[in-house]
Amino acid sequence: MKDCCSDGNNGEYDIAVVGAGSAGFSAAITAAEAGARVAIIGHGTIGGTCVNVGCVPSKALIRAMEAAHSGAAARRFAGVSVASRVDDWPAVQAQKDALVSGLRDKKYEALLPEYENIDYIETKAPARLVEGGVAFDGRAIRAAKIIIATGSSSSIPPIPGIENVQTLDSTSALELDRLPESMVVIGGGVIGCELGQMFARAGVHVTICCRTRLKEHAPAQ
């Protein structure tokens, strides 16, 4: 991480990108390659949702459980018998975590030194917009343009009594250190279905609850 004021630019940038995930990095690199002086302001783990708690870890676990399911499903063919099950869930999680760590380094942390006109600024608290720039941790930088790429976060639905029980969201579900015996998934969207299927293939009894019908595809953008 570079100090935003250490190289004589006086904390002034052509573009400030608030958010250090895939969208923020893509915007910053595109601007830098066009000659702009760019600051990426990150709060939390570099890499954002996709590599840390979204696409990468979920698909790693989904593919692992797909392999286990394929073996168990072999019995539907006459004369074929294959035994497969999850023997060591912590080992599965450790392999997933190693993949996440490696991709985060390769696609984000190790990429930054290649761009001398990009400064990565890691903040202790969320940044906020101020006149002429962005403020964070008691200081501010000036930028002609500001790109907001902070992504989104999960929210707890207003279900009566939900505040009295322990719940999981897509992030904490992917971090479970042991498999539960059963699980209720509230919502039949893409994330609910893919995680529900993954845990079912791992041997968890899964019930998916939804108000309409299961969603086959992500909504059009």
Image: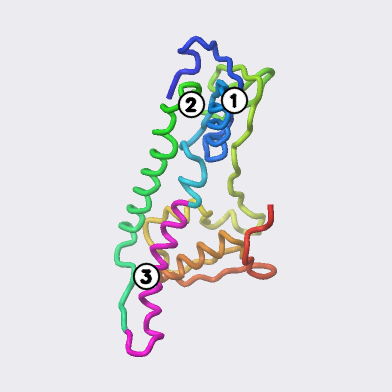
Counting from the top left corner in percent of width and height, residue 120 is at 48, 26
Which numbered disc, 2 or 1, marks the residue that appears first in the sequence? 1
Q: Amino acid at mark 2?
A: Tyr
Q: Magenta segment range?
A: 56-80
Position of residue 146 relative to residue 142, above or below, is below
Q: Amino acid at mark 1?
A: Ala
Residue at x 60%, y 57% (from the top left corner): 162
Q: Secondary structure at mark 2?
A: strand
Q: Main secondary structure of the magenta part?
A: helix
Q: Secondary structure at mark 1?
A: strand
Give the class, few, some or many, for how many residues have Cα within 10 Å of label 1's Cα (few <14, many ≥20).
many
Which numbered disc, 3 or 2, marks the residue that appears first in the sequence? 3
Mark pair 3, 2: CA separation: 41 Å
Q: Secondary structure at mark 3?
A: helix
Q: How many marks?
A: 3
Residue at x 64%, y 55% (from the top left corner): 157
Q: Quadrant of residue 63?
A: bottom left
Residue at x 37%, y 80% (from the top left corner): 74
Counting from the top left corner in percent of width and height, residue 73 is at 40, 79
Q: Which residue is mark 1?
A: 16
Q: Amino acid at mark 3?
A: Ala
Q: Which residue is mark 3?
A: 68
Q: Which residue is mark 2?
A: 120
